[in-house]
Amino acid sequence: MKRSGTCGDGNASGDQSQESSEPATNKAADAIASLVTGGEVPEQYKSAAGSVVHYAMGAATGALYGAIAERKDGVTAWAGLPFGATVWLLADEIAVPAAGLAKGPTSYPPSTHAYALASHLVYGAATESVRRGLRALLR
């Protein structure tokens, strides 16, 4: 089942047209492929390429969080929840629509935003948990 949301996981409106139902991560993968190769990702690889974009974004954001957490007190407060909420706000609600990869936030029902926020809160908590675990291993 395809998740709905502005983060690139599907289409919350029920519109099944190719343009509006394609996940933002797949659109981003196509944009990257176009810059590198001059063409889009072949159809049979779109889902995998979209997953790579999604996980690469999560890994890069998590690494940035870890680097900042080592240098700035208070960043790790509340077990990473503010980090997850910040990623949701800046990426899901602002950057993805601004880049034209999804419709604007008002195009989605509140339940879609709540689901996306909850998912990002889990991501923030998991990122902080991994950071703490790695930190303990390195001591």
Image: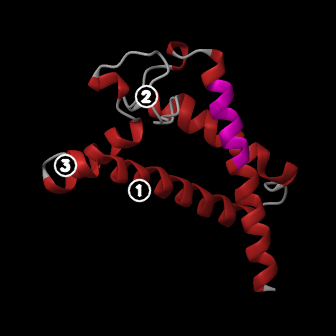
Viewed as shown, does residue 16 lie left or right of 3? left
Q: Amino acid at mark 2?
A: Ala
In the image, residue 119 above or below residue 124: above
Cα gap from disc 1 to disc 3, whole angstroms: 14 Å
Label 1–label 3 contact, CB within 8 A: no
Q: Which residues are magenta?
A: 113-122
Q: Position of residue 95 (x, y in %)?
A: 48, 34
**Residue 71 in view (yes/no):** no
Q: Of the two numbered discs 1 and 2 on the same chain, state the one appearing first in sequence.
A: 1
Is residue 44 within the magenta segment?
A: no
Query: Would you say the residues marked 2 and 3 are in contact, meaning their CB atoms lie under 8 Å apart?
Result: no
| Residue shown at the point (38%, 15%) measured from the top left | 15
Numbered tag placed on residue 52 in the rendering? 1
Distance from disc 1 to disc 2, alpha carbons, whole Å, reads: 21 Å
Element on which disc 2 rests:
helix
Magenta region, mostly helix, strand or loop?
helix
Q: How far apart are the alpha carbons under marks 2 and 3?
A: 25 Å
Q: Which residue is mark 3?
A: 42
Q: Earlier in the sequence, mark 2 or mark 3?
A: 3
Q: Residues within 10 Å of mark 3 (few under 14, many from 20)?
A: few
Which marked residue is nearer to the observer: mark 2 or mark 3?
3
Badge number at residue 98: 2
